[in-house]
Image (spheres, grey):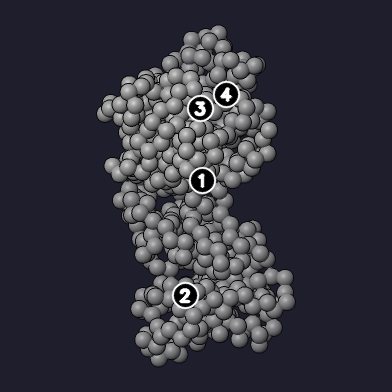
Amino acid sequence: MTGLLKTLEAIADAVKKAIDLIPSLEERGQDIAMGADGTPTSEVDKVAENTVLDYILRNEVELNVLSEEIGFVDNGYEETLVLDPIDGTSNAIAGVPMYTISMAVGTSDLKGLHTAYLRNLATGESMWAEKGKGAFKDGKPIKVRPLDFNQISMNVYLGNGADPKAFKLVKRIKSSRSYGCASLEMELVAEGQADGFYMNSERYSRGIRVVDIAASYLILMEAGGCVMDLKGQPFNMPFDLASRSNFLACNDRRLFDFVVNGDLGIEGRMVYGLAVNPNLPDIRDHAERVLKALEGEEVVLDSAAGTVLGTKGTPLDEMKADVMITIGGDGTILRTAMNTKIPILGINGGGVGFLADVEINDIENGIERLRNGDYVIEERFKIDSYIDGKSVEPAVNEAVIHTDSIAKIRQFKIFVDGKLSTEVRADGVIISTPTGSTCYAMSLGAPIVDPGVDAFIIVPIAAYKFTSRPFVVPADAKITVECVLDKGCMLVLDGQTEHHLDGGSRIDITRSSEKIRFIRFNTDFYSRVRTKLVNAI
């Protein structure tokens, strides 16, 4: 051990000795104050924290302290000890042998950590890591175990703030545990006793804090694991008590798609599909660059790509592939999504290309990352539409109901779960998903909606009354639009298909069980909005 690790070990020894002096479990659990994180402080928490602060002061340890109970203690140094004096307080109070002292040292955030020490105060087991030097348990190296999709075992947060997705997950895996001690649940992944630790709270106040997992974060990373946010990006948190978050800690990044998206992702040798907009300038050159980048792989072409390349193609709805690559704008992606459930990687050959993840000048790099599995699969829900009870194609962006005659106004009644929400005279009505909120709906002044929000946006088109404003309603609602007048309208889905509507027609719209799946390298929705919408011409 280095000098700093020996210091952290000595602190853990002192804490263990101090809490053992508390006479009873009942006294351990007595609430004596309110902590800096806004939760009650128990006697055992305060004794442990005071012991750490006293040790640092008496031994002139050159560290600031960020602790669950007292908050930030600025001792004037560059580095900070991120401390949870007792993680698993409820276990400690109940005599359950799973509670720790968790300590990690760094500058400003998780990525800046360089030393970590974790001790189960009930069993005496100690785990530690130094950046770049591996992870250890009681002096022996530890590593994550290989992922076996048939034998998945996970630690899952199932507390009173748990997201319903957590309960669905435990039904899909071979075994699950919920120990009530995040630092140990994460560390068990590092030593190969579990495949992952899933933390997903639907209540922000119950999310994880940096003090809970700072030590186990570095231990897991050094043991060969990974930690991602629930959008698939590398996880990070600043050194403060105000931030709370959800995440997935795991032994293999391939577990992300199984946990978050509900499937095993894409494994083994893949078949790639290629769909194109044949009317793009230089489309043949772009398609040939994709094929060259996929050299050695099995590739099937859609009918348009076949025509462009002078060979036979396959209709989209008959293509059998693991991944669809599209070259075109958002329309090409939507056309593809309407005809297949295959995950889509969009190459932007159009204008804004909001749904695409790869630009034309970056084809080779994008295909390389795709072949290497360096991506996540992002799911978005589609919508189902029914005309007088008869179903039509699912849509990704929106269902648009509008007049079938230029410059002729129509009257619509809009119901949400059978209740009349509004009646408007307008050119039409848009029912948009969050994915479509950056498209037609946005151009009419409706809000941009984060794709993580389960909602529909109901938007009148050129309404006669200024008071006819957009509505945002839950995605599990049934929306009904009645064409009141005995005059024709049109239903247009994603700008791809049209259906004539007789006067008096009734259109029901619900969330579809079918989803669109995007291959993503960058899941930051807000940077996408900034670069492709805010800064676009």
Between the residue at mark 2 and the residue at mark 3, the CA separation in whole angstroms equals 48 Å
Which residue corresponds to the image point at 32% horizontal and 42% vertical from the top-left? 420
Mark identifier at residue 450:
1
Mark 4 or mark 1, earlier in chain: 4
Q: Position of residue 299 (x, y in %)?
A: 50, 21
Whether 321 is drawn above or below 16: the answer is above
Residue type of the residue flagged with mark 4? Gly
In this view, the residue farthest toward the top is 310
- Element at badge 4? strand
Q: Quadrant of the C terminus?
A: top right
Asked if the residue under mark 4 is in contact with the one under mark 3, i.e. CB atoms within 8 Å, the reply is: yes
Mark 4 or mark 2, earlier in chain: 2
Between the residue at mark 3 and the residue at mark 4, the CA separation in whole angstroms equals 8 Å
Q: Position of residue 246 (x, y in %)?
A: 48, 57
Residue 219 seen in render: no
Label 4 neighbour load within 10 Å: few <14, some 14-19, many 20+: many
